[in-house]
Image: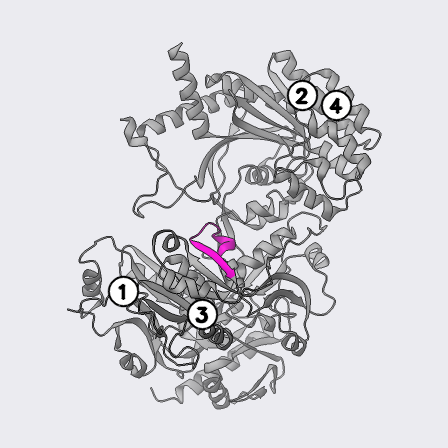
Amino acid sequence: MAQQDEDETMTDDGLRSRGMRDLGPEAMRRFRAVERSFLDVTGGRGYQEIRTPSIEPLHLFTATGALSPQLLDRVYSFLDWDGWSGERVVLRPDGTVPAARWYEQRWQTAEPARLCYVQPVYRFVPGDGEREQWQVGVELFGLAAPEADGELLMLARELLEALGLRDLAFDLSHAGLVRAVLGAARLDAAAQGEAYDALLAGGDLASLPGVTAEVASALRLLSAVDGVGAGYFENLKAALLPIAPGCAEGIDQLAAAARVLDAAGVAYRVVPGTARNFEYYTGLTFRVRSGGAECISGGRYDGLGEAIGGKPVPASGFGADVLRLANLAAASSAAEGAR
Amino acid sequence: MTSPAPQPQVRVALPRGDLRAGLAERLIAAGFVAEGYAEGSRAYRFAVTGRPEVLVRVFSERDIPIQVALGQYDLGITRRAWVDELLTRYEHDSIVPLRSLDLGVERIVAVGVPGTDIARLAASGVVRVATEYPQLAARYLNRLRIPAYRLIEVWGQAGFWPPDDADLAILPEDVSALAAEGLATVATVHTGSAMLIGNRRALAERDLRAALEPLLSLPIGLLDGGAEEPRPLDVPRGVRVEAPVHRDTLRLAVPDGHAQRHTVTALADAGIVLDGYEADRHVRRPTASIPGLTVKVLRPQDMPAAVARGQFDLALTGRDWLAAHLAAFPSSPVVELADLRRSRYSLGAVVPDALPAANIEEAIAYWRRDDPRRPIRVASEYAALADHYARERRLGRYQVIPISGASEGFVPDDAEILIEGSETGTTLRANQLHMIDIIMESTNCAIGNAVRPEGARGELRDDLVARLQRAGELVEA
């Protein structure tokens, strides 16, 4: 039966839209297995499932600044039946912003909200790449760093282990650290925006335009050395605090996250000079790899609630591509079987 | 039964309009003589001297990137702004930019009243932007990181919209026209010149030398250009809410262009005198003798959406444009209030006389006789109406090809069906075409919101509608 699931993303005679994939019975079995594990693990930790609409107003995403201009170029936005107003709607390009909207509009208590979802996001991808991506995600509103950061790191690990994934390694970074450094480099808001874009494009902090030689020198440690132990955080403080005292909190939060992983015996490295989805995140960010393949990414985005028009609230979360997890789980299971 | 004529091997799309004269001169110098193109012939299809394998077809500049992307034409020359307008949204599409040419230099700019500060606008609310270039405009506004904007997509003359109906317009810069509207350039959005483009697949698979060689010898443009990369504005994030519209006066929109003459007559019959709006001339904002009434001249195509947004209370447009608007936006609150019964014509599906079919069902069967899954191409200026028609008539797999004027000759070569208006059918007959299916009879009409304005404005609207209705009744059915 496996051949039914082959070539699922290939375009075929115009009968299926480009970049959209079918999931045959075998792929659906694997999809559901991931979904079940995800809901079991998150449910066991008090996370409640929500589902948000496929169509949202585009301005929800422009107003929050949560998506880079380059990503906004690639969303499925259009004028719907009410489009005479000139107001575009968009097929959900991201899971976190709608979840934050849901929290602002629907969550009635002062207790932290532990939410999770399984739903697709839509983005244009060149060629025959997948334009509909099913994601599992969790969002934790109302609980601040470092407690919430530690909870999410352990939840990510528990989920991946439940899926049978081995050789887990965490990459830790901190958006606040990068931001503090850019502020210390006296870049104005526009230049910081350009710096974010350069970072998103894979640029190196130390070579950004407008960065002085002194700052660049301090930044080398950020950009050239990946930390793997407690001593690294002391070195970072020595290099960065003289030029950017605002970094202290970020370094402490990174160190706290590292302690959680150390205690659990999980491998990690600290890569503070990288930043992904920079505008989105305000604190710790992390990616998890299994056998070298990236499988989960997430972080802290404390500013999102206010940007949506709500109250300031600490918030963090992570997400993963369901089918990627399913493929990694299948490969891991096959490797186990071969042993 | 007719057998299709042998297809030329290389198909080239060239622009009409103001690029034509300069381009024709350069084409002749390059040894690519499209017979009649330089002379401004009204024909739309040209043979090329000494190159029997090449066919040239003339399109509006805006349509050329679409035709090349679809693979209907292998090569095309048009302004870069229209190429980038398409590529901004569909960036890995089948267009390959081949060469910037040394003519048609153009700057697409954001304009507003002198002294307009985009950052201040963005900080204070929803920024309303009128433009014919929605993709380039959205790209620019996203890069400025404007938290909330609203694009007013117009058919042309975006400069008519600020300051009363938009905060900014994004349009090709024309300094004297801007000054006449009391506007000034605020920022550059895109620069470019005329550009030679090719279809990726045609370039990859077929021998296009007969046209490619001479076209690649055209003088190269020095301007590289492209979309600007503006620095992000320092504007606080957050949701902005558009302020509700409050006004004491009733706003009336009247059309320019072909519709103007008939509208002037209808207004005269209704006893509505507008100073500055005559049969052959108009000012942008004519003055009305009726207290409480303000008037603006707009494109009739843009009126239904403007009424829906609440920018105008009453507008004189064509029923075709109202139908096109409602086909695109079925929940729009705009309704017809009075039939002026002028500018009468039929809108329908146009096909060649040679098509062996008595009705649209037979036509569909004929087009699909060899390939049941073949897409049927429906070309039209009224893209939403064409889409609606294709669904209603169960065309199955179809492609809507949007066109912006110069619809002559689209069928049978570039589309199976053309959705088009015809007053008497004379032009259709002259081109061996006929209307196989009538979609609607269009006349000019007064449109407004389904909800009547309250108070004095509502009373004034009632009065004007009653007068316009009586003016319509004066016309022989």
Residue identified by numbered label 4: A252
Which of these two is toward me, B44 or B133? B44
Say whether residue B237 is visible: yes
Label 4 – label 1 distance at C-alpha: 72 Å
Which amino acid type corresponds to the residue marked 3 in the rendered image?
Answer: Val
Marked residue chain, label 2: A
Which of these two is toward me, B210 or B402? B210
Which amino acid type corresponds to the residue marked 1 in the rendered image?
Answer: Gln
Taking the view exactly as shown, the residue that stands out farthest to the top is: A339
Circles 4 and 1 in contact, beta carbons < 8 Å = no
Q: Quadrant of the C terminus of chain B?
A: bottom left
Label 1 – label 3 distance at C-alpha: 47 Å
Task: Name the element at disc 4.
Answer: helix
Marked residue chain, label 1: B
Residues indicated by labels 2 and 3 sit on the same polypeptide chain: no
Residues indicated by labels 1 and 3 sit on the same polypeptide chain: yes
Q: Residues within 10 Å of mark 1 (few under 14, many from 20)?
A: few
Q: Earlier in the sequence, mark 1 or mark 3?
A: 1
Tell me the tag on residue A257: 2
Residue identified by numbered label 3: B335
Circles 1 and 3 in contact, beta carbons < 8 Å = no
Marked residue chain, label 3: B
